[in-house]
Amino acid sequence: MPIKKVKTVYIVGAGFSSYAGLPLTTNFTDAMLKARGFSAGPSKLIVDFVSQFIRDSFDISTKATGDKWPDLEDIFTCVDLSANSGHHLGGRFAPADLRTVRRSILSRIIRMLDQSYKSGRKAKTPSWLLLDNFFSSIDLTQSGFVSMNWDNVIERKIQLNLGSPFIDYGCDAIAAGVPDLPNSDDYTTDKQYLKALQKARVVSQGKPLSDADSAKCVPVIKIHGSINWLYCDNCRRLFWMHPDQASMIADQLITTEDLRRMEKILGKKNVANKQDTIDKLKSNPPMLCVCTDDVRLGARIATFSYRKALEFPMFQKSWFAAEELLREAEEWVFLGYSLPAADFEFKYLLKRTQLSRSVKPIIKVVSGGKPASIRATRGNYAKFFGRGITTSTFFGGGLSAFMKS
């Protein structure tokens, strides 16, 4: 289905989501490591495991703060290049262990982003209210989004304004629901109940939208993936869950095999028994695709690696959709995105789309933060887009300055 034509495309980065209380990308590590203070739970286990990996691979203390850790780009690049090519990274971490490291970090980031959003919603800071006002003031029927982020801030704000997350991800994603758990009273033995739990699967909602609802759909193109997406490696279908169910996706990423590897690396004895497995599945039933009972759905997120894995179908479709959206829009508004050099593939998409148009788009940039950061961001855009970046099109006072214009 062709992507909806809109008047304004908002290209958003981590600075945009920070208005909702989410950390900037540079602060992700510190936010992840807050789980060290937890008494128990999956987040603490994950952080302990990843900290051990950082110690063994980068010679950083397991108690070191986030500013002492390698950049996430360096971590993911080393992990991905080794795991994807089937090589060890040091003697302790085989490719399977490295894939557990990757899934663990992603699981913790998803949980952290979800928790940060909920904390922001509870606190309702001036920045939170400013973001609410922004979504209330724009015409969502004539707006589209290209997001560099994984989080669901956009979807959740759209839901508040439209009453339901009418989203077109532009990559043929299928709306799906969390499977209902079977009732243990319906089974005579634990073995039967465990088997029933293991058969739990994602069930597509399967109801086509009405014409009225289709007209409400807002294009939200996530070129690096989304924390509410699940992908089937068998039939290659992509499912999207309700934004409020993102924490369930975090649980879905960690398998029983991953837990065993964590316990092995951490030197803990695996004491899991059948009842433990039942208890785990009660809280986290494996989500299986509708195509088969044998394939567990998994996340597909382009990590911070310098060599992002963008060859999967949903990413290719998302990038085509982003280009189509940008080609037709009258106005490009960059919100909280510094146009970093590392995003060279996206910058190339922007430049070739801009130059291919007979009528060039109006380009506006909204930036915030410290003066030095604002100056650097303005310099990035001026060097890339030229003389169109002026005092009338660059808003260094953040979202509040843009909304006053």
Image (cartoon, helix red, strand yellow):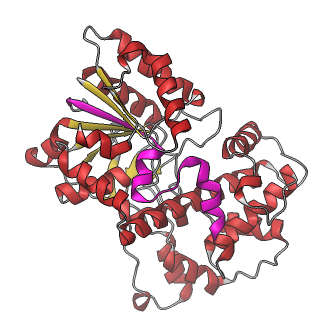
The residue sitting at the top extreme is 358
Picture coordinates of residue 320 (x, y %)?
38, 26
Q: Residue at x 25, y 22 (%)?
A: 328
Q: Is residue 372 left or right of residue 230?
A: right
Residue 193: tell me if it is visible: yes
Relative to 253, 36 lies left or right: right
Residue for point 51% across, 39% down: 371
Which residue appears farthest toward the left when viewing the image?
A: 212
* Quadrant showing the C terminus: top left
Query: Is residue 227 or residue 381 the one in the foreground?
Result: 381
Location of residue 48 with respect to 191 vertically, above or below: above
Q: Nearer the viewer, residue 373 or 270?
A: 373
- Determine whether 93 is above or below 38 in the image: above
Q: Is residue 208 visible?
A: no
Q: Is residue 359 above or below residue 302?
A: above
Residue drawn at (33%, 50%) of the image: 154
Residue 101 in picture, x, y percent from top left: 71, 55
